[in-house]
Amino acid sequence: MAVDQEGRRLASVGNRIRKAREDRGLNLHELARLSGISAPALSLIETGKRDLRVTSLLRIADALRIAAGDLLQDNPAGAVRVAARGGYDLGDYK
């Protein structure tokens, strides 16, 4: 996966975290307190500048009272995403 695509995905997850936080009326410091993750680290996560661990994602999701998967999905709930091409191209991973 290209680095720029990874960056876009991190930014997308970060945007969903920020939106969920704002929708719940929480500021960054309040989410930090609820999740046990520092406000500066959360800021980096929300801006897509820091790759978060699964444990951090779970702590954030628990603090926001949302399913962790909802923070990862970039498609509407219930929608099935079909790959544009079938199968796997393992030639990219030599």
Image (cartoon, rainbow, N blue to C red):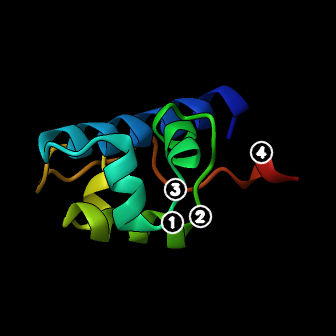
Q: Which residue is mark 2?
A: 53
In the figure, is residue 45 to the left or right of 78? right
Q: Earlier in the sequence, mark 1 or mark 3?
A: 1
Give the mark toward the camera: 3 or 2.
2
Pointer 3: what residue? Answer: 87
Q: How many marks?
A: 4
- Give the left or right position of residue 85, taking residue 17 as reference: right
User: In what element is the residue under mark 2?
Assistant: loop
Q: CA distance from mark 4 to mark 3?
A: 13 Å
Please rate how many residues cluster around mark 2, counting C-alpha atoms within 10 Å: few if below 14, some from 14 to 19, many from 20: few
Residue at which label 1 appears: 56
Residue 92: mark in rendering: 4
Q: Position of residue 79 (x, y in %)?
A: 14, 50
- Identified by mark 2, the residue type is Arg
Q: Secondary structure at mark 3?
A: loop
| Residue shown at the point (62%, 49%) measured from the top left | 51
Residue at 33% over, 45% down? 17
Tell me the amino acid under the disc marked 3.
Gly
Give amino acid for label 1.
Ser
Q: Are marks 1 and 2 in contact (CB under 8 Å)?
A: yes
Q: Position of residue 3 (x, y in %)?
A: 71, 32
Category of crowding for the residue at label 1, using alpha-carbon neighbours closer than 10 angstroms: few (below 14), some (14–19), many (at least 20):
some
